[in-house]
Amino acid sequence: MLKPRKNEVRKPTRTISGITPVAVMLPPRKCNHGACIYCPSLDVPQSYTPKSPVVMRARDVKYSAYEQVKARIKAFQVMNHPTDKIEMIIMGGTFLQYPKKFQYNYVKSCYDALNNKVSKTLEQAKKLNEKAKHRCVALCIETRPDNYDVDRLLDFGCTRVELGVQIIDDLIYKKVNRGHTVDDVIKATQELRDAGFKIGYHIMPGLPGSNLKKDLKLFKKLFSDERFKPDQLKLYPCQVIPGSKLEKLYWKGKYKPYTKEQTEKILVEMLKNVPRYCRVMRVMREIPPEYLVAGTIKIDLRKDIEAELRKKDSKLKEIRYREVGFALRDKKQVNLDLKLKITKYKASKGDEYFLEIVNKDDILIGLLRLRIKKGSATIRELHIYGKSLRLGERKRVTLQHKGIGKQLIKEAEDISKKNKIKNLRIISGVGVREYYKKLGYELDDEGYMVKNLPEN
Ligand code: SF4
């Protein structure tokens, strides 16, 4: 790769949402329940292929978390991206099924690499990261709905959990050997949300036993039924990959994936039905063509779909579509006459307040998620969009540093007070603790940042 020119940022969309994502891949390990029939088992991390870029990078360093993080940071630096605010994501297999000691060491190694120093304990590594050059502002762990441990996730400094949900139908779960039920999804969603985690669902249209009508009906249910209502989605249409049981069914003529047209159709309908409080993180898995037996090959289908929707002037409400970073990338004029918009909705037996700072064109500058349930209030997310900027830097477009975060926190405090709540807690990436400290919050024993709210 040619070295970029001074100030030229390669692949700018990588950090367009305001943070620098660093994915680390786990070493291969089979899931405890066996294998879901669409999941490839190819002597690499479960559900990935040997040619997936993240797998290749991980194999190069023998799956060392430390080396993977180091290498990614270096790669981002070479491409002139900022590397002070890192979102870490641990992927491949079901992390919480690995031996417990391995899990703790693995997470510690991620922090160690960010700190450029090997700490003795995870606690020390986290503490050190609070003021490190590369701060972990968010940590995401992928897992199954029947495999989570709230206390351990808090120990890790985790802020987001991605659940492999695929579809909310017990018969299909049986058919594809998921090994869990819809009730597990409901329970995990509630307990994780109550603890303040951001909840992402992986959704898989086109599974055996489903069809376009059923996929769409169940997708709509995700947002009409308060037991679900995820904050984020990854939409991964079912594909036939070598080494999966689905491949055998496919060759026997017992399963057919959606055609490109069907895939496009279902994705358009799904995207149109995502409410404004949910972000569609990804559409389509990055399966290298040589590992695709059948299914849609087009990895960047989302781009085509969104371009088509824009042409028809049909607007999507989901978060990513409205983020200011994309408007700036597309050289749109962004009106900075901003207003606060609050959407209140019920989810998992609690009240969710979704606060947004938007302009008149509904372009999104910042958001906050506040959950109120049984006399307690938790901020589950605070995110200011725009260009990812080095901490403290004020030279370029500094949307992230214009006090929008402070304003949103103040609103959340006011709503909490109106609900007669005495203290507000925030689930915080280790690297954001300093920011909250400046706003009067203190770290509690469980890892939340907490503030007593004075009575008016
Ligand atoms: S739970 Fe995920 S990783 Fe495990 S077999 Fe199923 S799809 Fe693959």
Image: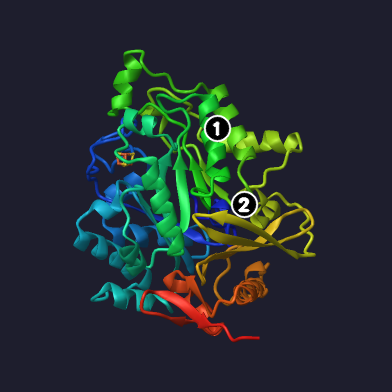
Query: Image check: 99 left or right of 266?
Result: left
Q: Amino acid at mark 1?
A: Lys
Number of callouts in the render?
2
Query: Image check: 419 left or right of 171?
Result: right
Q: Position of residue 239 (x, y in %)?
A: 41, 28
Q: Position of residue 333 (x, y in %)?
A: 78, 55
Q: CA distance from mark 2 to mark 1?
A: 22 Å
Query: Where is 448 relative to 230, above or below?
Result: below
Q: Amino acid at mark 2?
A: Ile
Q: Looking at the image, which is closer to me, 401 or 210?
A: 210
Q: How is the image coloured?
A: rainbow
Query: Image check: 48 left or right of 436?
Result: left
Q: Residues within 10 Å of mark 2 (few under 14, many from 20)?
A: many
Residue that badge 2 annotates: 319
Which is more foreground, mark 2 or mark 1? 1
Residue positioned 22% across, 45% down in the render: 29
Q: Position of residue 402 (x, y in %)?
A: 67, 73
Residue positioned 60% across, 43% down in the render: 274
Q: Looking at the image, which is closer to me, 319 or 77?
A: 319
Query: Where is 71 relative to 171, above or below?
Result: below
Q: Position of residue 322 (x, y in %)?
A: 67, 51
Q: Looking at the image, which is closer to me, 41 or 212?
A: 212
Residue that badge 1 annotates: 217
